[in-house]
Amino acid sequence: MAATCSLLASFLLCFALLSGVSFAADPFVSYDFRVSYITASPLGVPQQVIAVNGQFPGPLLNATTNYNVVVNVFNHLDEPLLLTWPGIQMRRNSWQDGVLGTNCPIPPRWNFTYQFQVKDQIGSFFYSPSLNFQRASGGFGPIVINNRDIIPIPFPQPDGELIFIIGDWYTQDHKALRRILDSGKELGMPDGVLINGKGPYKYNSSVPDGIDYLTFHVEPGKTYRIRVHNVGISTSLNFRIQNHNLLLVETEGHYTSQANFTDFDVHVGQSYSFLVTMDQNATSDYYIVASARFVNETVWQRVTGVAILHYSNSKGPVSGPLPVPKTDVSSPWSAMNQPKAIRQNTSASGARPNPQGSFHYGQINITNTYILRSLPPTTINGALRATLNGISFVNPSTPVRLADRNKVKGAYKLDFPDRPFNRPLRLDTSMINATYKGFIQVIFQNNDTKIQSFHVDGYSFFVVGMDFGIWSEDKKGSYNNYDAISRSTVEVYPGGWTAVLISLDNVGVWNIRVENLDRWYLGEETYMRITNPEEDGKTEMDPPDNVLYCGALKNLQKEQHHSAATSILNGHLKLMLMVLLASVMTFC
């Protein structure tokens, strides 16, 4: 028996290696994502949207801590495509991050298979396109990373889950919106807010007839885990469910100290989990609302998404005015009360058995400080551009680590300033030369006129402070050095700053960007390049066998001649080999 098992395992392993399969002991999940245009009318106006597998929004990507994830992406658009996975840390593997600094785009009618591990992660995230303003037309969907069975969640098992994909929306597609920005104009007020790709329930006469809205069906007395993702373009949204409390329990992969809210501000690019108990008497249905925040809400009334919460014993439809947010944002400082109340649950286990609070970040010496200042968009070289520290980023034609590995000179610069200087604004491919195993402080200083969300790929960071005014060294005395939330996307108020701490233990090239899509498109981003000078293959993976080449290395790229069916077959064959090999090794 043992000899037979050994022989079979050896045969499968050799065949798998010849087929280009990389085997890992952890389980895996596999998805085929066909990204294409479909016609939809979410706000009553027919328009072209980007669907995944014919769905808008796209399907759920569901995994568990340490699973290997394989996503075979087929680009059926008429322009290049990359999918990115904000908050998924891609440990040692920035080759899969899906932004232009790390990946060559997938050409139209080509496919590319992403392969990554959700190492030591749990929580709520989403995926979306990262190129050409495409997220404004869709292509996004939710990601859930579940706890392993051996790691208990820090609350009773919910009776069910509901996912809310919310975001501002225009009835013009991403190409039209792109042309507006390219012409030097701002986009102006959105046409509405979508909830899971649907428009608003007709709560008053301002909503046109015939709009398809969403109804969520629930059972009385049950408690549901509600995951909320703001995948919009540039509008912060206040989320609320009429007469129901939102018990905050998790954000972007970390469990929070549990706190009740009547309504909650979800900024662009952010994800949250709440527990909601269906404890009302169901005399009627209830409104679910996502409305524009930190704008003139009277003028922006149309920028409101409305869905319906329907109890199985409901006595009738909902009517009357929408519930208004009770969270006070009448003064700048009161607006910060909510984000400052988000604290880490230090006693709960996250992806690992040890408590989340066992990493004592407040006791670690800061090795470098980077102050990243944003300004309102301005004209540089005749075009509207957005900047960080006076630099509007120009994406490299050859991805950074690909250029490094192939000794391409001049693909980028490692001269990004660690603070703003009084210099002329410029276009450049300038990046941060960060130090492996450093512990850095990043100050996001928002001198723009709009609230912004900043994101760092490859990491989560500790949100230790935020305030209005100009950050200075003495502000460190107000930091939360004990239970600051760890996350990957944080809001920065106009005229204010947010301070985060990052432990640089993930080798690679990692995008730092504003998630507000208009500003990102206009160049408000940079990258951190982190290399291990003693690299031995253990802290950074080699490029994958299916790496795409472009820019200075485009001559290395071979044409894809296979059919879609052949590509799917090959992908599934590799996965079947991995399953069979894992089964044989386990059985034997």
Image (cartoon, helix red, strand yellow):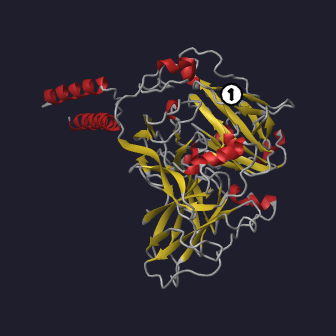
Horizontal arrangement in the rendering, residue 453 relative to residue 332 (left or right): left
Residue 345: percent from left, percent from top:
58, 53
| Residue 482 appears in the picture as rendered | no
Q: Residue furthest left?
A: 1
What's the residue at 26%, 33% (across, down)? 581
| Residue 108 appears in the picture as rendered | yes
408 over 175 or under it: above or below = above
Q: Amino acid at mark 1?
A: Met
Residue 499: percent from left, percent from top:
73, 43
What's the residue at 74%, 57% (across, down)? 336
Pointer 1 residue: 431
167 over 381 or under it: above or below = below
Quarter that holds the C terminus: top left
Query: Residue 475, located in which quarter of the rendered image?
Result: top right
439 over 161 or under it: above or below = above
Horizontal arrangement in the rendering, residue 439 relative to residue 149 (left or right): right
Residue 524: percent from left, percent from top:
71, 38
Horizontal arrangement in the rendering, residue 586 relative to residue 90 (left or right): left
Q: Secondary structure at mark 1?
A: loop
Quarter that holds the N terminus: top left
